[in-house]
Image: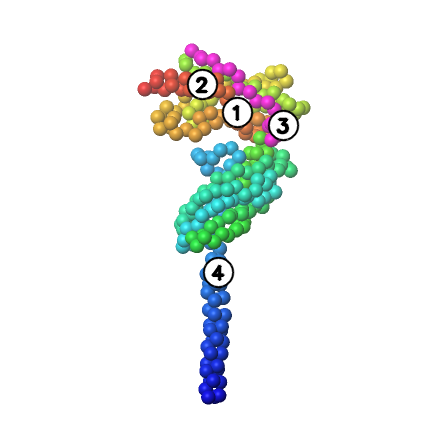
């Protein structure tokens, strides 16, 4: 009987040990498999300018998904010494697997202009906060190409705007109707410092053409006579115009290379221009 009792106890001990071993081997491996993070998605990014869809101060970060499953971009941050940091900007955009990029429109901060209007963009990267199909979240830092023509252009434009704002006040005067139905006005550029100013060119928009006369000195600055006329009357063009009053002037500061700057169009001038466009287009029908 003694040997029988020993055998029974041995069976129970062996069973307990086996169960413990099975639990220790199966449990952790099962938990590890369930919580193992997915691999980061294979993405690339470029900086682009999409004039049709962008507001001032925006850049498009075009993200391409080279993997085989869609990902969702939750946030984007632009990192460069050329623009003041704005932190992560929240988004919620799906990027499917494709050779075609998906744009993320984000704001960029104030430009750094160590070389004035001749400044160029420093190296840049973008941080993407991405969620994959399994719910895992990844933070990717992607280098942008350098030198970067897109960022160079944005830096030049921003630095030109800073230079103009520091040296000149630009005002579009009242508009009056001419005998032929066009509108006449004057662009005044007043210096805010000691630098001499000149206006070398004025351009209209997709809807309005501008004929500029020669600039002339006035009250320490310069004025330019302008004539506004309808440029396009196509219904789809008028209806789809994103920047109907996107007028620009090229201003030379202190004899330097002219830099482009937008012309602000007050609301009453806009109303006059819309009325002129309607009348001139009706004449052409």
- Residue displayed at 59% across by 34% down: 159
Q: Is residue 240 magenta?
A: no
Residue 210 seen: yes
Crowd tier of the residue under label 4, counting other residues whose Cα lies within 10 Å: few below 14, some 14–19, many 20 or above? few
Position of 186 with respect to 193 (left or right) is left
State the image coordinates of residue 10 (x, y, percent, origin top left).
48, 82
Q: CA distance from mark 2 to mark 1?
A: 16 Å
Identify whether 60 is placed above or below 161.
below
- Per the image, the residue denoted by label 2 is 271
For marks 1 and 4 on the same chain, the one whose residue lies earlier in the sequence: 4
State the image coordinates of residue 237 (x, y, percent, origin top left).
38, 28
Label 3 element class: helix
Label 4 element class: loop
- Per the image, the residue denoted by label 1 is 263
For marks 2 and 1 on the same chain, the one whose residue lies earlier in the sequence: 1
Q: CA distance from mark 1 to mark 4?
A: 56 Å
For marks 2 and 4 on the same chain, the one whose residue lies earlier in the sequence: 4
The quadrant holding residue 198 is: top right
- Per the image, the residue denoted by label 3 is 166
State the image coordinates of residue 127 (x, y, percent, origin top left).
53, 47
The part of the chain drawn in magenta is: 162-179
């Amino acid at each position: 009987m003694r040997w029988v009792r020993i055998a029974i106890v041995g069976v129970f001990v062996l069973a307990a040990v086996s169960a413990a071993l099975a639990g220790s081997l199966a449990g952790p491996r099962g938990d590890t498999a369930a919580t193992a993070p997915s691999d980061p998605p294979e993405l690339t990014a470029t900086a682009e300018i999409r004039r049709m869809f962008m507001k001032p101060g925006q850049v498009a970060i075009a993200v391409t998904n080279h993997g085989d499953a869609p990902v969702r971009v939750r946030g984007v941050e632009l990192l460069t010494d050329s623009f003041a940091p704005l932190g992560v900007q929240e988004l919620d955009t799906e990027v499917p697997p494709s050779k075609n990029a998906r744009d993320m429109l984000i704001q960029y901060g104030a430009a750094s202009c160590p070389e004035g209007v001749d400044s160029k963009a420093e190296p840049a990267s973008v941080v993407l906060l991405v969620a994959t199909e399994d719910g895992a979240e990844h933070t990717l830092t992607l280098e942008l190409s350098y030198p970067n023509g897109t960022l160079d252009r944005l830096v030049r434009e921003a630095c030109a705007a800073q230079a103009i704002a520091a040296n000149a006040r630009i005002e579009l005067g009242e508009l009056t109707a001419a005998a032929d139905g066009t509108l006449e006005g004057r662009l005044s550029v007043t210096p805010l410092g000691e630098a001499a100013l000149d206006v070398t060119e004025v351009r209209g928009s997709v809807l309005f053409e501008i004929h500029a006369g020669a600039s002339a000195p006035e009250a320490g600055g310069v004025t330019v006579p302008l004539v506004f006329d309808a440029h396009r009357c196509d219904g789809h063009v008028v209806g789809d115009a994103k920047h109907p009053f996107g007028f620009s002037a090229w201003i030379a500061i202190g004899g330097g290379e002219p830099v482009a700057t937008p012309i602000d169009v007050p609301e009453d001038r806009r109303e006059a221009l819309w009325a002129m466009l309607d009348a001139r287009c009706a004449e052409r029908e």
